[in-house]
Image (tube, rainbow, N blue to C red):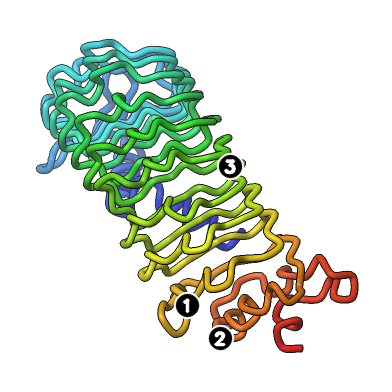
Amino acid sequence: MASWSGERNQSVGGPEPQACRLLSLLLLAAAAARGLARSPDGCLVLQSNKGTSVSCHSAGRFPGDLPADTTFLSVEFSNLTRLPAAGLHGVPRLQELHLSSNRLQELPATLLRPAPRLRVLDLTRNALRALPPGLFEGAAALRVLVLKENQLGALEGSWLQGLGALWFLDLSGNGLSTLPPELLAGLSSLRVLDLADNRLETLPTGLLRTQVHLERLHLEGNRLRELPGDLLAAQRQLVYLFLNDNRLASVAAGAFRSLRRLSMLDLSNNLLASLPPGLLAPLGWPSGYLRDGFDLSGNPWVCDRDLEDLFRWLLDNRDKMFSANDTRCAGPEARQGETLLAAAGA
């Protein structure tokens, strides 16, 4: 569903940290244009009454001698392969650390301990295969953690211990094939979980039974074959659910029964030929609302008697339907190529 990919990208890191980061970068660019301070490491430095922002691009090494009041540090597109264990010593006020688009293969276990106020950590597009035990000890303020597009082929449940304030977790694009059931244990503040573009064929039944109350769940671009009936039972606050571009051939009856607040559902580009009667009843009119719409396109629907319940639901909720012209019958032969809306109204 192309119309939603942009929203997902815009939401990475959450609206607050993204806006803050954009403002910081614009101010740094303005400072550079006026020829203002550069550190000895070739980084742009902007000082204000709220603290110092340091931005380094294509740096040869991690900057040293950072101002003690540094609150924002960006060292991106610099081909760094490692970080000094004491790299953040002397910057106890640091709130944002952006290290995307380097070649980091490992992180020092004590890296974050000198920065107890850190709220945003962005490690997008590196070469991390694992996280050291205890990395987040003392990182109780961290709200946004982005590990997108690394090489984390497997995760350990202990890696995320200590992140009780975490709100946004992005693990997309890592080639993950399995997840530990206890991965989210203790993440009681988590609201956004992005597991898109991995190799997941199944999800542990206990993964979402913790105290986590998600509002947004990204599972698109995996290899999921079925959606169990109890997987989402505890996620009553869920607003956005993306299951598109998987291999779903079946969704269990009752899988969506708890999702009374769901505003967006994307099931496009799967292998669905039918749905259990009543599956979508908790969503859309008259019991739900699906304010932002739904997408069922790109599935091999068999438009026979087994789809009559879906037909009725579609007619009631057609005004919220995306890609209606690409939501077509694959069978029986007499209806092959007909849109589901046309078949529903026949």
Mark linked to residue 222 = 3
Residue 149 on image: x %, y %: 50, 32
Left or right relative to 10: residue 91: left
Left or right relative to 250: residue 325: right
Residue 27 visible in the picture: no
Which residue: 41% across, 28% down?
A: 76
The alpha-carbon separation of the residues under discs 3 and 1 comes to: 26 Å
Viewer-proximal residue among 111 and 276:
276
- Mark closest to the chain's N terminus, 1 or 2: 1
Dot 1: few (<14), some (14–19), or many (≥20) neighbours within 10 Å? many
- The quadrant holding residue 49 is top left
> Which residue is the site of mark 2?
316
Mark linked to residue 116 = none
Q: Are marks 3 and 2 in contact (CB under 8 Å)?
A: no
Q: Is residue 217 above or below residue 312?
A: above
- The quadrant holding residue 344 is bottom right
Dot 3: few (<14), some (14–19), or many (≥20) neighbours within 10 Å? many
Residue 303 visible in the picture: yes
Q: Secondary structure at mark 3?
A: loop
Three-letter amino acid code at disc 3? Asn
Viewer-proximal residue among 258 and 291:
258
- Mark closest to the chain's N terminus, 3 or 2: 3
> Which residue is the site of mark 1?
284
Three-letter amino acid code at disc 1? Gly
